[in-house]
């Protein structure tokens, strides 16, 4: 297999690349390599023409530019793109291998990555694919955050609930990382689990408002419909993860789908038990239950911290992982502090955007 074919084209479908290059041969080589890899290629001879192309086609999100060109050079082009962009544009610059000063200037102006001339086709493919991965993550992170807020609005949760979910989860995950290293949880992963914990109820966007806020006792069919939110949320995030392969989205998918599983196997949607339930979901299961118990809802008056604590202890080894319960007890004072700090009022997180 030739070098210019050794690249993953999974990211390349319907992706546009703008080549800005005044040398005809170099422009032709880049064009051919990228077309063969499955990209749609647009060409510009200098920075001024590139700005015209970008203004005419907002779908162009990745630019490969030379730095030394007539009329408008690559440095001025980078500056203008960063001034005018409505959505982030990923910029790759071409430099010669011994020209470190030029490269440093381009990066300082806002270039994202570079290609050393003469450009090898395999390096070109890999760096362009990396750029599109960054752009996809940006797009999907915005979408997921919007859906998180939508789910909160749908269920009339306050922004403080999302804040508490983050901080409670962070406290428990970090405790387990420090005190039970045999679980394989690092501080870095603990932070990621906390970051995505507010996505736990994303699937509620698929549940009717009437059902979510019904104060009367639910019948069997209504309970089943409400429980569907775990599969809906997990499925939504799984679709995004399949396109990005981002590890934090994998954690988010596990949390959204499995945080209602129980240690004794009597939970939903799959009836998993014990350590077959991912640790991230076991952590969020306790956090979500604690916050639900201590918050006023349409169907219940919130319990005190002590009452919720006793309920958690009664369900250790049943609903909750005993090791997670032990971490909760070690961090009990932090839970009280967080609950008092983030009362049920709109928070900056909730109101953002």
Image (cartoon, rainbow, N blue to C red):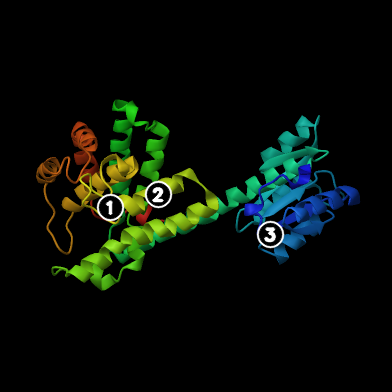
- What residue sits right under mark 3 in the picture? 60
Label 3 packing within 10 angstroms: few (<14), some (14-19), many (20+): many
Distance Cα–Cα, label 1 vs label 2: 17 Å
The disc label shown at residue 23, or none: none
Determine the residue positioned at 65% across, 59% down: 13
Instruction: Name the N-terminal-most of marks 2 and 3.
Output: 3
**Left or right for 176, reference 89:** left
253 relative to 173 in the view: left or right: right
Q: Could you say which disc has been placed on residue 252 in the image?
A: 2
Q: CA distance from mark 3 to mark 1?
A: 38 Å
Between 106 and 213, the residue placed more toward the observer is 213
User: What secondary structure is found at the residue carrying circle 3?
Assistant: loop
Q: Quadrant of residue 173?
A: top left
Q: Nearer the viewer, residue 234 or 57?
A: 234
Image quarter of the N terminus: top right
Q: Position of residue 34 (x, y in %)?
A: 76, 52
């Amino acid at each position: 297999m030739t070098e210019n074919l050794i690249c993953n084209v999974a990211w390349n479908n319907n992706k546009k690349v703008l080549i800005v290059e005044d040398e005809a041969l170099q422009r032709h080589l880049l064009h051919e390599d990228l077309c063969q890899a499955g990209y749609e290629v647009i060409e510009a001879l200098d920075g001024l023409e590139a700005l015209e192309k970008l203004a005419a086609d907002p779908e162009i999100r990745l630019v490969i530019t030379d730095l030394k060109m007539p009329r408008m050079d690559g440095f001025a082009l980078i500056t203008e793109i960063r001034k005018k962009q409505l959505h982030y544009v990923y910029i790759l610059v071409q430099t010669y291998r011994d020209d470190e000063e030029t490269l440093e200037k381009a990066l300082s102006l806002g270039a994202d990555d570079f290609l050393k001339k003469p450009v090898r086709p395999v390096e070109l493919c890999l760096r362009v694919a990396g750029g599109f991965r960054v752009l996809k993550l940006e797009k999907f992170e915005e979408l997921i955050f919007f859906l998180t807020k939508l789910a909160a609005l749908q269920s009339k949760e306050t922004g403080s609930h999302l804040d508490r979910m983050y901080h409670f989860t962070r406290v428990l995950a970090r405790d387990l990382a420090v005190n039970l290293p045999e679980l394989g949880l690092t501080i870095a992963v603990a932070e990621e689990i906390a970051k995505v914990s507010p996505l736990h109820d994303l699937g509620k966007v698929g549940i009717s408002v009437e059902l979510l806020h019904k104060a009367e006792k639910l019948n069997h069919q209504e309970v089943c419909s409400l429980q569907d939110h775990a599969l809906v949320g997990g499925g939504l995030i799984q679709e995004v993860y399949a396109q990005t392969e981002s590890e934090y989205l994998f954690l988010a998918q596990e949390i959204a789908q499995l945080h209602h599983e129980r240690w004794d196997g009597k939970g939903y949607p799959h009836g998993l038990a014990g350590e077959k339930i991912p640790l991230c979901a076991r952590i969020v299961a306790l956090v979500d239950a604690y916050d639900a118990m201590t918050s006023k809802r349409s169907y219940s008056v919130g319990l005190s911290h002590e009452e919720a604590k006793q309920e958690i202890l009664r369900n250790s080894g049943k609903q909750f992982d005993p090791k997670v319960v032990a971490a909760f007890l070690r961090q009990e004072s932090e839970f009280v502090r967080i609950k008092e700090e983030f009362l049920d009022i709109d928070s900056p997180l909730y109101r953002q955007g």
